[in-house]
Amino acid sequence: MLYKSRIGSTFSEDTTIRFSTFNCLQNESNTEVYCGVSVKDAQRAAILATEAFRQFKKTDVSVRADFLNGIADELELQRSELIQMYCKESSLSAQRANSELDRTIFQLRSYGNYLLNEQWNRPLLSEPEHVPVRVETKLQAIGPVAVFGSSNFPFAYSTAGGDTASALAAGCPVIVKAHPMHAGTSWLVAECILKVVQEQQLPDGVFSHLLDNGHDVGEELVGNEFIKAVGFTGSIRGGRALMDLASKRDAPIPVFAEMGSINPVVFFQSELEKNLELWIDKFTTSISNDAGQFCTKPGLLFVSQSAEGIQFIAELKKQLSLTEPTCHLHPNLFKNYKEQVEESFKWITCKQPYHSQPVLREVTAREYLNDYNFYEEFFGPQAIAVLYKSQEELIEMLNKLGGQLTTTFIGSEEEFLANEEIIDRAKEKAGRIIFNGVPTGVTVCDAMVHGGTYPAASDSRFTAVGTQSIYRFLRPVAMQTIR
Amino acid sequence: MLYKSRIGSTFSEDTTIRFSTFNCLQNESNTEVYCGVSVKDAQRAAILATEAFRQFKKTDVSVRADFLNGIADELELQRSELIQMYCKESSLSAQRANSELDRTIFQLRSYGNYLLNEQWNRPLLSEPEHVPVRVETKLQAIGPVAVFGSSNFPFAYSTAGGDTASALAAGCPVIVKAHPMHAGTSWLVAECILKVVQEQQLPDGVFSHLLDNGHDVGEELVGNEFIKAVGFTGSIRGGRALMDLASKRDAPIPVFAEMGSINPVVFFQSELEKNLELWIDKFTTSISNDAGQFCTKPGLLFVSQSAEGIQFIAELKKQLSLTEPTCHLHPNLFKNYKEQVEESFKWITCKQPYHSQPVLREVTAREYLNDYNFYEEFFGPQAIAVLYKSQEELIEMLNKLGGQLTTTFIGSEEEFLANEEIIDRAKEKAGRIIFNGVPTGVTVCDAMVHGGTYPAASDSRFTAVGTQSIYRFLRPVAMQTIR
């Protein structure tokens, strides 16, 4: 069977483009063959999405909530097939696959149910004193949204992931460009969504799914006049390329790109004294889990210079060296990681292909300040530790960093107070400040902020996770009448 | 006296750049001489603003409300001097000057008072069921903002205008680049603001004021790493240039540009039958008032083809030809308007220099559809009228338009219902839909949306007028603790 793209209810035309996915654990290609979509069909999807938009934007919130809950139900029904495909395309465990699918389902349901609360889009009403008019403002859906599947979250940040769920909740049709590394998982999820579109008699074109292993189709979507916003989760290079394309359009559109973050962690003295073992355990897992391929993986640890600090680094190093080598999601990600870290940092090879040994590298404050550019995250099971000997040195090191998804502080209330200025500065860069926790694990809830200043995210005024992400795809429109 | 820029509390260094403003009514240069600021001083202002930001962002809302109310008080005290300078730099009437100053003062007070309502930045709080954490999110000030004075609102959209008031309300320091056409008005307003900064002991650098008649200083501000957002009101060309500069930065920043709009008006049959004289009166004023140099001036009238429609156009034409010629704000604006309209449209010269005769030009639907590009507004006392003979023709003509600040419908409830689809499509482009009113006159209130899709505004998700404009300069930051 040749897997094809879906332009709403129809299949894409044939092209000569063929590709398959790869199983790193087995070191072999998967057998399914995917047909790359034509640029012409991508354009067709954009036009169809615009037609669907005219109806979909006017649907009652209950219709959209039913749609999202319907997708969640269908994913649950297809769970075993989805998990199987996910595992052979990502080399991640069935446990991880299941928990990511749980999260995806929860996300769809919580965004859908959020719409049922009248407060979510409460009209603003003004009747100005000296003018006999009435102005009523409500949020309107922005238009068709192009969503790019992410490499590291085949469920939660891809086909039916956060960007799709929030755009559909807002009333925007979605065109997904599947991530080529997990085209099969994406295809199966798309089938679930399209089944619900048909069953619930939603407008044709409210969802399309494009298979592609190049750049032309993505560029067409971002440049296409009918596309009104873009959702992306991935590298700085990839996200910036989309931002640049969108800003060069005749009519620029917003790109919501969640990109790279090194996620600094500051260890103050007291917790190293009180809970050394606890933090060694927690950070061993947080750095190495699923090959460290999380956008919130802690990549940079600032540790108070003391006997306990030195011990913490030594023990964390040891624990990481004792964990099992972890398998990267895809040969490309493995290659990128290797190239990025082997030049400056430790690279631990393993016998098994596409595996690497989790590792902590220690650098001195002088090395850190003089030699490295920590603008880019390293997307793998590795972190850097630096001892700091004073608040001034810590501030100097933190100042070198760009925008962050998270910044974490481990310490006592007294230490947080004494370092208020540092925490305050961290808030200028990060979307989320964590006290006494690990940065990995982004809870889907109303208050979550998964964002931050560039390059963590393209637009720090919005979040990519949680119900507030819906507001990325809405714009206010005022209706003025006489009174 | 040589007028210089202010870098916080200090004056700018001397340069060789000198310029003056111009009085179109008198056809002569004003006598005051302004010293252009150096790029180095612009950089100094940005650094000083960042230092001020660290304190200012943490001020209690009452401090910022007092600041805005203090500026309002000071402007009121200096009213007569301000009005005098305004009139000789803009050639607008004292009546207009006074009402614009009233609006500016009202704006400052209402944005300040908005902060005193606890709801304006209500924290979002989540305690997710399965994770023992507490996530609390509040909006934080984004950082120093560069504000470009507008040509047509020397008070309300310049030095102490909407962008400045909303940025200061949010907790962001402001650097104003004065519009060179009314440098004197800007200088006087800046003095008022700086006096309040000193009296209220606000951090030095929370406000700076740059005089400049070129492009280098503006480019420096938009590219400067310490500037975190830009506010601009002006032409599409100018706004787009700033958007392009900002998107090319290492770390792109948002530009809130309110640019060009042709503000279409659709006249349905019933009101032409019932209230012909009323609408002729209202639109004569709306098109010609203050030389038509309003961003919401109605530039394009679609009139139902009927005896009354034909009469409406003929009468409106006549009334406009009988109004007094109006004086443009500045030789540059006069020149731009003349160049833009003389090629395709009617150009009515007058004896007095820098004046032009308000005019309505009628084109056929065929001419409209084939010959013209209505993407750009024409910034002067001119409008185009087209008769439409069917709903289909009207839709075809509306489809040619880009993003709009406003779209207006004049008719009965029954006609609005019968044309629901047309109104619905207008909402995809415009920030404000007006029923049975004129588009000029933007009321400052909570529900106002002065925005729209590109090119009306750079980012349709925000408004430039009304209290909600404060949210342009804020970003959410989550604080995650254990529970």
Image: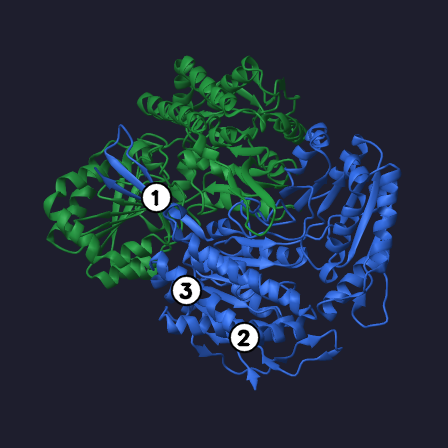
Chain colours: A blue, B green
Q: Is residue B87 left or right of residue A223?
A: left
| In front of the other: A195 or A72 | A72
Q: Amino acid at mark 3?
A: Phe
Q: Secondary structure at mark 2?
A: helix
Q: Amino acid at mark 2?
A: Leu
Circle 2 sits on which residue? Answer: A188
Q: Secondary structure at mark 3?
A: helix
Calculate the distance from the C-alpha at mark 2 to the C-alpha at mark 1.
39 Å
- Indicate which disc, 2 or 3, sits on the residue closer to the N terminus: 3
Residue B325 percent across, percent down from the top left = 28, 32
| In front of the other: B45 or B210 | B45
Find residue A123 and name its label: 1
Find residue A67 and name its label: 3
Mark 1 crowdedness (10 Å alpha carbons): few <14, some 14-19, many ≥20: some
Output the chain of dot 1.
A
Res B104 → quadrant: top left
Point out the image quarter for the N terminus of chain A.
Answer: bottom right
| In front of the other: B257 or A461 | A461
Residue contact at pointers 2 and 1, CB within 8 angstroms: no
In the displayed structure, A355 sits above or below B253; it is below
Q: Amino acid at mark 1?
A: Pro
Calculate the distance from the C-alpha at mark 3 to the C-alpha at mark 1.
24 Å
- Indicate which disc, 3 or 1, sits on the residue closer to the N terminus: 3
Mark 3 crowdedness (10 Å alpha carbons): few <14, some 14-19, many ≥20: many
Output the chain of dot 2.
A
Residue furthest to the bottom in view is: A1
Calculate the distance from the C-alpha at mark 2 to the C-alpha at mark 3.
17 Å
Point out the image quarter for the C terminus of chain A.
Answer: top left
Which residue is at a point 47% across and 17% down the rendered structure image?
A: B70
Which residue is at a point 19% across and 60% down the rendered structure image?
A: B389
Residue B111 percent across, percent down from the top left = 43, 28
Q: Nearer the viewer, mark 3 or mark 1?
A: 3
